Amino acid sequence: MPPRQDDETFADYAYRVLCDELIVLDIKPGEPLNDDVISRRLGVGRTPIREAMKRLEGDHLVVAYPRRGTFASGVDITDMAEISEIRQLLEPAAAARAARVASPRVKQELKEFALEVDQLLAGRLAQRDLMRLDMRVHRTIYRAAGSRHLEDVLIRYDNLATRIWSLVLEKLPPVSEHIAQHIELLECIADGDVEASARLTAKHVSEFENLIRAVL
C-alpha cells in the first residue's frame, strides 16, 4: 500500500489509492466496494472513505445504487470514440497553454522530466509501468497548463481512456515508442513552442486511439 503523503488528508489519500486501483483495474469492473473492508485495508476511517467514494462517483469510476451499495463502474469500449473526441479537443489546448504560460521554473522541470522519461524508457519497462509513466506525463502537462478546471476535466477523461487501455493491455505490443513521443512534446512545451506542442499532442492522442482499436 502506498504511504500517505504529509500534505494529504485521509480522504485525499483514500481517493488517490482507490482511483489508481480502479484505473489499472486492480479493482475489477463491477466489483463491490465495501466501506468497512476498504477502511481496514487503508487504515482510514469510514468518513474519509465515503468522501473519496463521492469523488470517484463524480469521476465515473464507481457507481452507487440505493440499498445495493457501490461498485466499480464498467469499462465500455464503445465510449472510446467519444472520449477520444473530447481529448482531441482539450489535450492540444492544454499543451499549447502550458507552452504559453508555464513559468521558467516549470519549463526547466519539464526539460528535466523529458530526460528522466528517456532514461526510464532505456530500462525496458513492463507494459503496466509504461502505462503509469504515460499517466504521469499527461498529469504533468495538465498541471503545467495552469488551469485547475482544465486539469480536472482532462484527468477525468485520461482516467477513462487508461481504463480502456488497462482492459486490453496484455493484447498490445510494447508501447515504449508511443510513450517516447512524450520526450519531444515535453521539450517543445519547455521551449515555448505553442504550435508544435498542440500538433504533437493531437498526434499522440490520435495514435493512442488507433493503437487500442487495432486490438479490439
Image (tube, rainbow, N blue to C red):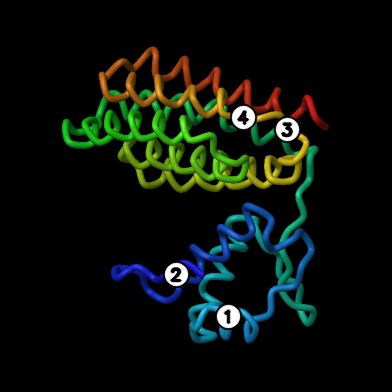
Q: Indicate which label's residue lies in the foreground, 1 or 4.
A: 4
Vertical comparison of 40 with 89: above or below: below
Residue 13: which numbered mark, if any? 2
Q: Residue at x 68, y 80 (%)?
A: 34
- Amino acid type indicated by mark 1: Arg
Instruction: Check if mark 4's residue and mark 3's residue have beta carbons within 8 Å.
Output: yes
Q: Alpha-carbon neighbours of circle 1 within 10 Å: few (<14), some, or many (≥20)? A: few
Q: Alpha-carbon neighbours of circle 3 within 10 Å: few (<14), some, or many (≥20)?
A: some
How far from the left and from the top, in percent, is residue 186? 36, 26
Under circle 3, the secondary element is: loop
Residue 111 placement, left or right of 199 = left
Tell me residue 7's x, y (percent): 29, 68
Q: Earlier in the sequence, mark 2 or mark 3?
A: 2
Residue type pointed to by label 2? Tyr
Q: Secondary structure at mark 1?
A: helix
Q: Which mark is residue 111?
A: none
